[in-house]
Amino acid sequence: MNSQTSRWRHELQLNARYIAAGIFNTLTGLTAIWAFTLIGLSPLMANFFGYMLGLLASFFASKKFVFKSHGHISKEGIRFVCAFLFSYCVNLAVLYAGYVRASIHVMIAQTVAVLSYTVCMYLLQRFVVFAKVKPHK
């Protein structure tokens, strides 16, 4: 197998693991939101704590499962939070541009905004947060 094929295979594996981790993170956050709601937290507090648990699960799933990083946890953690905040701002900007400015149907605008977040977050994790991770030979 040549190096180009190996590189493509590595990228496809990263993408598959990223999607699997995303499903896990979504289920973790949603389950936490439901659990916090059931124990009596307000919907806003349940949502906040569910998202925080989801973000924590996302970091560790990305670090250990997706990118298999052995980097310093606090440095990568800070970069991860910055990547999240930036990606979320991109999400909001896309939503605003689509729904408010262009009057696109809200569900289409939300979908495009979520996709923009997902792609932005992946690229930042791949090339900034866990940039030192090298493909397996």
Image (cartoon, rainbow, N blue to C red):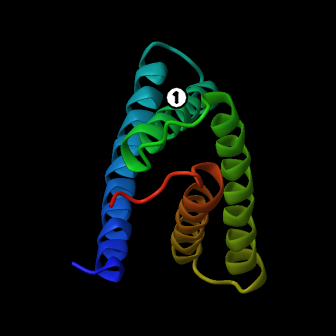
Name the quadrant containing residue 18. bottom left
Q: Mark 1 is on which residue type?
A: Leu
123 relative to 55, above or below: below
Residues 78 and 51: in front is: 78
Query: How many numbered tags mark residues here?
Result: 1
Q: In this view, does 66 lie to the left or right of 122?
A: left
Going 32% across and 69% down the picture, which residue do you hit? Answer: 12
Residues 3 and 84: in front is: 3
Q: In this view, does 64 lie to the left or right of 113?
A: left
Instruction: Give how far across and how far down residue 19 sits, in percent.
Output: 36, 58
Write down the residue under mark 1.
53
101 relative to 20, above or below: below
Report helix, strand or loop for mark 1: helix
Instruction: Give how far across and how far down residue 107 sits, in percent.
Output: 52, 71
Q: Is residue 33 left or right of residue 80?
A: left
Is the residue marked by circle 1 packed among few (<14), some (14-19), or many (20+) residues within 10 Å? Answer: some
Identity of the residue furthest to the top in this view? 39
113 relative to 29, above or below: below
Going 52% across and 38% down the picture, which residue do you hit? Answer: 59
Instruction: Give how far across and how far down residue 88 sits, in percent.
Output: 68, 55
Name the quadrant containing residue 31. top left
Q: Which corner quadrant holds the C terminus? A: bottom left
Q: In this view, does 118 lie to the left or right of 19?
A: right
Residues 82 and 132: in front is: 132
Going 58% across and 52% down the picture, which residue do you hit? Answer: 132
Q: Which corner quadrant holds the N terminus? A: bottom left
Residues 59 and 72: in front is: 72
Identity of the residue furthest to the left in this view? 1
